[in-house]
């Protein structure tokens, strides 16, 4: 009872802390142009003394049109040198505030991009998160009575190129609560079922087991917030193998042996964990190993599951709706490491642009011209451009969106996919260039003459719900190739796992291992399929990665397989 009372008090404080942000966002939804012009003026004024601001004469810019004329659209590579210099301890030329952290996200070549995280960027994220939290608690007031599970930041360790010296900007991941503001951060940590120290557990199996332990220990869980629904689906699917040790731990009050073997996280997690024999008896009586359909009874008061509901997420969404039929599944907005583009708040299932956070522009598909939020047209497709307080100026995010509605005067967006040849089924962000490098490296070393090689996404791998990738190969020595196929797949996947997000998805069990298939006439089959899609045969290029999933029927490569 005392814990529930403390949780309710923290929830009320969190609502009060988020409410001013919600009011500001309500005004911004009705006046998107004024809100965006205010954001741009703030960014230009704060950064006009930087090397970047002086080079582009920020002090002379008075309008969004002048800003677009003076500052070119940019890819990450335009900022990479300045970010690297800041990492090594030099002045940061892109923004007045020095980054507190460089947060990795996948680059087009598989090597991670390092996104500068500054206090300004965190405040911009808070300007999006706060109205979402306030609206969530106002729309679902029973959430005030229980605890939440948030899972956004990955726990997979990242190997650095070189050791970091003292005084250099660290590389890593922010605690999710860092984006909520001081009061929001303080009270949020008082309502989470999952301790923040779980992010320090680097072994994937230990992380999964301990996450389930803390979630199952909490009978008053009201909200689950994850990024991709496959994360939650994989987590819950692993429950049968972890359940016996979870029941033992709940009865003994001791963390399972072998979990969180590092002394620091094990000690801190142990302080948060208490025995609960009654809860252990409840879970044992459900017999979840043989009756997974009873999972909803584990958390009978679960009100909302918040997760991504974009392209290619429907199979996992369907599973969650089946497992939790009385729980609302709320689609998230469009959020990236670099910034927030849209959010769900107050307009039903619509996700309006985050007009109070960053300065947003959108490149028109038909002519490549960038336009501001207030010039977006219903039904048109665009590519997102971000300008943020972290030092990214007119940065091409390469997220393709469509305007599907308006919330008051602000456009609402639907995410369509990446526009720069990146496959992203479960957050792995696998780039075509990275795949090409992997294939070239493996076959250059082995001296194999390839007639055709391509990696394609494979939904529902090998009769399972798990997704993954296929390596399609055509070589002269077919008999020898069949025996060597597992070896080649292993080597190619080793290269692909240099991509942090791909490696993380594999470690978490969201992606199946790379599977190899021998094909014949692969190039011809691909070209014929492209012609059927409407391509001109003279302009067809054969990529190393075909990011597209077949919309219906058999994929093109099945006509070229050797008995697969």
Image: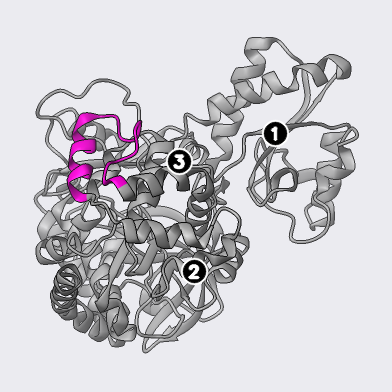
Count the labels in the image.
3
Q: Is residue 32 visible?
A: no
Residues at circles 1 and 2 in contact by the CB criterion of under 8 Å: no
Sequence-wise, which precedes: disc 3 or disc 1? 3
Residue 238 circle label: none
Q: Tell me the quarter of the image containing the C terminus.
A: top right
In the rendered structure, the answer to whether residue 186 lies left or right of residue 484 reads left
* Quarter occupied by residue 312: bottom right
Compare marks 1 and 2 and give the one earlier in the sequence. Answer: 2
Q: Tag 1: Cα neighbours inside 10 Å, few (<14), some, or many (≥20)? A: many
**In the rendered image, which residue does mark 1 sit on?**
515
Name the residue rendered at 34%, 33% in the picture.
257
Quarter of the rendering containing residue 265: top left
- Closer to the camera, 551 or 45? 551
The residue that appears at 26% across and 46% down in the rendered structure is 253
Residue 260: where, in percent of width, then height?
A: 30, 35
Residue 113 horizontal side relative to residue 287, left or right:
left
Q: Residue at x 72, y 40 (%)?
A: 541
Residue 95: % across, % down: 16, 48
| Residue linked to disc 2 | 296
Lower position in the chain sequence, tag 2 or tag 3: 2
The quarter of the rendered structure image containing the N terminus is bottom left
Query: Measured along the vertical axis of the image, is residue 68 above or below residue 538?
Result: below
Task: Kindly identify which numbered label has been placed on residue 501.
Answer: 3
Q: What segment carries the magenta color?
A: 252-272
């Amino acid at each position: 009872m005392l814990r529930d009372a403390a949780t309710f008090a923290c929830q009320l404080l969190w609502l009060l802390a988020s409410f001013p942000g919600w009011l500001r966002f309500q005004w911004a939804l009705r006046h998107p142009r004024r809100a965006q012009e205010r954001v741009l003026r703030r960014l230009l004024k704060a950064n006009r003394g930087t090397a970047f601001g002086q080079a582009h004469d920020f002090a002379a810019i008075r309008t969004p049109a002048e800003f677009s004329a003076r500052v070119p659209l940019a890819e990450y590579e335009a900022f990479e040198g300045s970010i690297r210099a800041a990492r090594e301890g030099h002045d940061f030329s892109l923004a007045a505030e020095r980054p507190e952290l460089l947060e990795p996200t996948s680059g087009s070549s598989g090597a991670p991009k390092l996104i500068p995280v500054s206090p300004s960027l965190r405040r911009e994220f808070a300007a999006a998160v706060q109205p979402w939290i306030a609206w969530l608690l106002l729309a679902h007031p029973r959430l005030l009575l229980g605890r939440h599970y948030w899972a956004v930041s990955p726990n997979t360790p990242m190997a650095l190129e070189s050791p970091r010296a003292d005084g250099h900007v660290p590389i890593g991941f922010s605690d999710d609560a860092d984006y909520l503001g001081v009061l929001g951060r303080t009270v949020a940590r008082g309502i989470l079922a999952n301790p923040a120290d779980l992010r320090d557990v680097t072994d994937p199996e230990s992380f999964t087991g301990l996450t389930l332990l803390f979630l199952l220990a909490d009978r008053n869980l009201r909200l689950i917030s994850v990024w991709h629904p496959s994360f939650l689906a994989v987590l819950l699917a692993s429950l049968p193998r972890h359940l016996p040790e979870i029941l033992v731990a709940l009865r003994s009050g001791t963390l399972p042996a072998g979990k969180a073997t590092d002394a620091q996280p094990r000690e801190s997690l142990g302080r948060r964990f208490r025995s609960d024999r009654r809860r252990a008896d409840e879970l044992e009586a459900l017999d979840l190993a043989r009756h997974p359909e009873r999972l909803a009874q584990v958390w009978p008061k679960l009100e909302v599951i918040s997760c991504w509901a974009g392209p290619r997420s429907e199979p996992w969404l369907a599973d969650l709706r089946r497992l939790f039929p009385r729980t609302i599944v709320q689609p998230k907005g469009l959020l990236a490491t670099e910034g927030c583009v849209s959010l769900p708040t107050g307009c039903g299932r619509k996700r309006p642009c985050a007009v109070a956070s960053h300065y947003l522009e959108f490149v028109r598909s038909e002519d490549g011209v960038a336009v501001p939020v207030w010039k977006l047209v219903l039904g048109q497709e665009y590519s997102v451009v971000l300008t943020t307080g972290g030092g990214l100026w007119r940065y091409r995010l390469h997220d393709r969106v469509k305007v599907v509605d308006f919330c008051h005067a602000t456009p609402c967006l639907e995410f369509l996919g990446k526009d720069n040849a990146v496959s992203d089924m479960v957050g792995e962000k696998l780039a075509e260039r990275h795949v090409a490098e992997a294939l070239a490296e493996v076959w250059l070393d082995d001296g194999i003459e390839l007639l055709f090689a391509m990696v394609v996404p494979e939904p529902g791998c090998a009769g399972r719900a798990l997704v993954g990738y296929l390596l399609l190969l055509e070589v002269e020595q077919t008999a020898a190739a069949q025996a060597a196929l597992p070896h080649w797949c292993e080597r190619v996947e080793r290269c692909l796992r240099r991509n942090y997000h791909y490696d993380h998805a594999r470690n978490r069990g969201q992606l199946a291992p790379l599977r190899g298939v021998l094909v014949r006439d692969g190039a011809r089959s691909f070209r014929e399929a492209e012609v059927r899609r409407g391509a001109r045969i003279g302009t067809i290029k054969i990529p190393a990665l075909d990011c597209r999933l077949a919309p219906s029927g058999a994929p093109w490569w099945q006509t070229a397989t050797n008995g697969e």
